[in-house]
Amino acid sequence: MENTQSKSSIKKEQKKKEKELKRQFNVKEKETRHAEKLQKEQLENEQESETTKSNYGEKDYSEVFGNLENTAFRYVKIKDLDPTYHNNVITMRARISQTSTHGKSLVFIGLRQQHFRIQALAVERESLVSKQMIRFIRQLNEESIVDLEATVIYDPAKQIKKSTHPNLELSIKRLYVISKSKPLEISLEDLSLGSSESQAYSVPLSTRTNYKTLDLRVSAHQSIFQLQSQVTNIIYNRLVKEKFIEIHSPKLLKWNLDNWSSFSLNYFGETAHLATSNILYKQMAIASDFNRIFEIGPIYRKEHASTHRHLCEFTRIDIEMRIEEHYHELLDQIDQMFIEIFERLNKLPELLSLIGQQYPSESIVYGTPPLRIDYTDAVQMLKDLNEIGMGADDYLSTSQERRLGQLIKSTYGIDCYMIDRMPSDMSDVNAMPCVSNGNQRVQQNDRQYTNSFVYYIRGQEIAKGSQRIHDHNQLKLAINEQQIKYNLLRSQDEINCYLDFLGTLKYGCYPYAGCSIGLESLLMAYLGIPNIRTCSMYYRDCRTLNP
């Protein structure tokens, strides 16, 4: 028995030694092959001519920017290329979007400048493109930035996919790396997935936030913020044309207008608050005889909600203007401004198409003149749909606003509308009471309805405003009435803030009206994007403070 066990253990030991010897042999053979490959590449590199060696490589800072006298040098942009460039040699700086190898003597690379793309290839050619150069290009990571010299080839029969110039191709003569990218941990292709694809929105928002720099390179997101810039430019230019002047109000405030929603901080021993609204400063400017003013700037809200439409920091367009006869003078200005925004954006089909590929939606429909509905009529439309329990003065819930938007679309065929004469419970304390509501006469001290409005796109609130109470005694009365009505729920800070403002009305003030427009909300509703965070370049919500 012992002899049998001894033989068995000897065999096991022999097999173990044989296995180890085989492993060592394989490792040595692998190392030999690798060394031979390196030696071969080294020999090829040594044999490579100085001419071909100088046609590729990495450039350092001094090589790229050291020659200050070379001011006439011109890079060609991808978007400017067309068939007239055929057989011309150009110089270009772009990102590598992809690489594709076909043997040792040919490599294709995709080049990108924002959303403009073109294909380039390097083919082994004596004294110009070497195997070593092709190997160098093949090893470059996506998103690296390169300078290249290439011949433009136009072939009307070609249809190159993922290229904004499917009939054009670049034949590379020289290529130099300006900025090398590390291997990507997430691809732009994944970040570009849209709802029409099988892996719809497979990249979660948290991942997009962690790779924000890459996410913002996605064509749809590039286009969103180009449109956002267009919107602010359209608004700015229109308001200046209409004789409005831009002001800049403080964002550090002594008083807190919304005790439940502001951020506070230490200000040299005092408590200060980040502005949740700049309405009082706009009104003070009007009282100072600046007849038409506007401001485009940040607003801060301590929002604990994580819904698709809540942000803690957003950009707002605030408008205030003196009125002569009726606050609808402001509504007319707002209507015409939105029409101009829509008409101008509709003339940018390329950007809209890029966004639509990732965030498909129907184009908005708006009326001329725009639709205005009295609040009581809007409530009646919902009651007719058996929205049980709604009173004439009830606050519209988010779902009811959305349902009303669908109802107006089916009834009037439009996405944009304005609800006028809102209930006082849904208005600011300084909103002017209505003197009439349709055919129903109401007393001036009956604050059931106010000269206020809300502008909606696709059932989402985009802007709101009102005629402001400009009389000192009337505003003081309104503040006291609301204090009694809400059982002193208004914060002492808010009371003190309004009392400060009351002092500016003692010296007389013209009748005026104003409104506020959320920039990100406007863009989200216009484009039909499901989450407002996509329309904020570096969004801030209750969970996100970086980047």
Image (cartoon, helix red, strand yellow):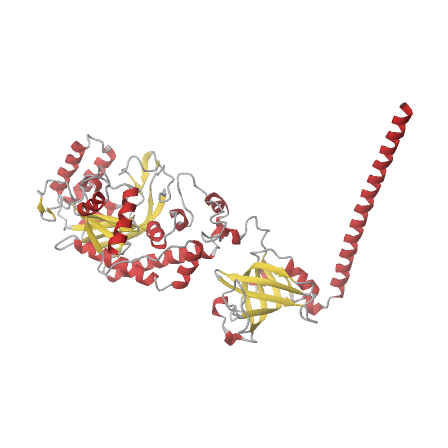
Q: Let me know if residue 239 appears in the view.
A: no
Of residues 281 and 488, the one nearer the viewer is 488
Of residues 442 and 297, the one nearer the viewer is 442
Quarter-wise, where is residue 387 in the image? Answer: top left
State the image coordinates of residue 101 (x, y, percent, origin top left): 64, 61
State the image coordinates of residue 389 (x, y, percent, origin top left): 22, 37
Query: Is residue 520 left or right of 90 when viewed as pictured?
Result: left
State the image coordinates of residue 121 (x, y, percent, origin top left): 61, 66
Of residues 16 and 326, the one nearer the viewer is 16
Of residues 137 and 161, the one nearer the viewer is 161
Query: Is residue 191 left or right of 32 when viewed as pictured?
Result: left
Query: Is residue 408 left or right of 61 when viewed as pictured?
Result: left
Query: Is residue 242 left or right of 7 when viewed as pictured?
Result: left
Residue at x 36% of width, y 54% of height: 527
The mark tally for this picture is 0
Q: Let me know if residue 34 appears in the view.
A: yes
Residue at x 24% of width, y 50% of height: 515
**Name of the residue lying farthest toward the top:** 1
**Name of the residue lying farthest toward the right:** 3
Up the image or down, 355 lies above or below 489; here it is below
State the image coordinates of residue 458 (x, y, percent, origin top left): 30, 51
Which quarter of the image is occupied by the N terminus?
A: top right
